[in-house]
Image (spheres, helix red, strand yellow):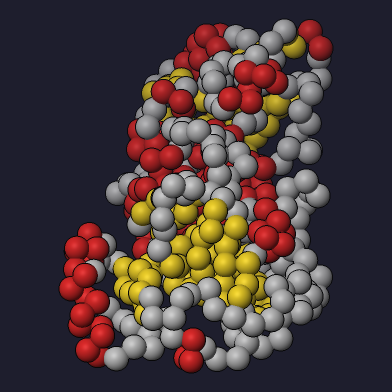
Amino acid sequence: MSYLGIGRAEIKRKCWKLLLALICSLSFTYIAYNTTTVEQPQTSNLLPTRHVYEYGSESAGACNRNIIFYEQEFVVLKYAIHIKKDVFSITCKDTPPQYAFKYQWDNTKPLQEWLQKLQTATSVFQTGAIYPVNDIPTFVFKRIEAHNLYHTMCEWMNVFYISKRLQLSPSNVDILFIDERPGNMLDPVWSTLFRTVTKADNEQELPVFGTLIWSMIGYISPLNNHALNDVPYLQEFRDFFLDSFRLKTKTKLNCKQLQITVILRRDYMTHPERQAIFGGRVHRKFKNEGDIVLTLKNNFPEANIAAIRLEDLTMLEQLSLITNTDILVGMHGAGLSHVLFLPDHALVIELFPLSFHSDTYIHFRTFARWRNLKYLCWQNTNQENEFEDFYTKIPKNIVDVLSTKANALLCGNM
């Protein structure tokens, strides 16, 4: 319990009134604010110092360092109050700082918008009042593609990466959602990885946040920067993720008992917009699932072959299978984010329909490269293999060729 700016006797009296609240939330401390204790803020008229940067390098602070900018990507606020939705407030005697963030698309600028709405005042606290303070560093998210495993993986990586840069424990940070995204099957994973998850609403009174982090969005995650030769903390993130589910990966390859996993894509409602835009239909689906699995069984008669729909499995069930998979097969899609959790010896086969070019959509080829995994892909170039409702037929001879190559690369058999 820490206090700011009031006497010991006053603390004692107010503590009795707050006893119940303290019991309910051991992670909170309380501050009693006295304006005489506020130091003068520093200048807050800031611009980025350079355009070529290292991920997470600090560029400038303002308002007596109640706000700190980390090179065009994320922001740390001290003793911040959440007013409503994407409006926050901090103590600052100057005008709100000016800053330009780095974004890939002009229409997706959450941090820029938050900064424009940031409220500042000489004191955001009333003199003599006591405020509960959440001492646990808290990451703020306005999720854009909350239903998508790849983009959510980028956001999980961002929390881990920023935590490491700020010397925080990733498993001991809180998450605050300020979006209105409906619940989805990825929501429980947030609670498994991090300490607590809160979804803000206008009726809910939140504490003062001792450290509030405006996290960089998934689109500018290191995982989404496919030009990188390697990703900082990638192995540590992988270990953290699997440790959170108490899982380890297979370490030995047994070519007489291969585990081959085929990820199937079928129509289902991932999010409300899909019904309006695509009528609930999913892109990049196999037209001939049964033929593909049968051909793989003929080519690998001793292997165990699992054809799965990720949406039918919990994350624990998905990871339990993926961490023991020797060959992962799938159409280009978010499910191949699981390349991150394959064993070190594994091989990936990625398939592309006519309208998705393998030289453009290099997400999972890059994941495989970062992890030094073996990788094969096939690009459809024949319109006859494409069907209505986003189905693609994979010819048997293609599956045969890929099987031969995979066997040679993995087990040295021709």
User: In the image shown, does 258 or 198 lie closer to the viewer?
Assistant: 198
What is the count of numbered marks? 0
User: In the image shown, does 75 or 349 lie closer to the viewer?
Assistant: 75
Up-down: is 161 above or below 12?
Answer: above
Residue 4 appears in the figure: yes
Residue 308's spot in the image, x, y percent?
45, 22
Residue 345 appears in the figure: no
Residue 123's spot in the image, x, y percent?
54, 78
Residue 238's spot in the image, x, y percent?
46, 53
- Residue 270, picture quadrant: top right
Residue 368's spot in the image, x, y percent?
60, 46
- Residue 225, picture quadrant: bottom right
Which residue appears at 53% of the width and 73% of the height? 124
User: In the image shown, does 377 or 237 lie closer to the viewer?
Assistant: 237
Tell whether 225 sits left or right of 309. Answer: right
Which residue appears at 43% of the width and 18% of the height? 301
- Residue 280, picture quadrant: top right
> Quadrant location of the C terminus?
top right
Tell whether 108 sits left or right of 30. Answer: right
> Quadrant location of the N terminus?
bottom left
Which residue appears at 76% of the width and 28% of the height? 356
Which residue appears at 65% of the width and 34% of the height? 376
Tell whether 235 sits left or right of 396. Answer: left
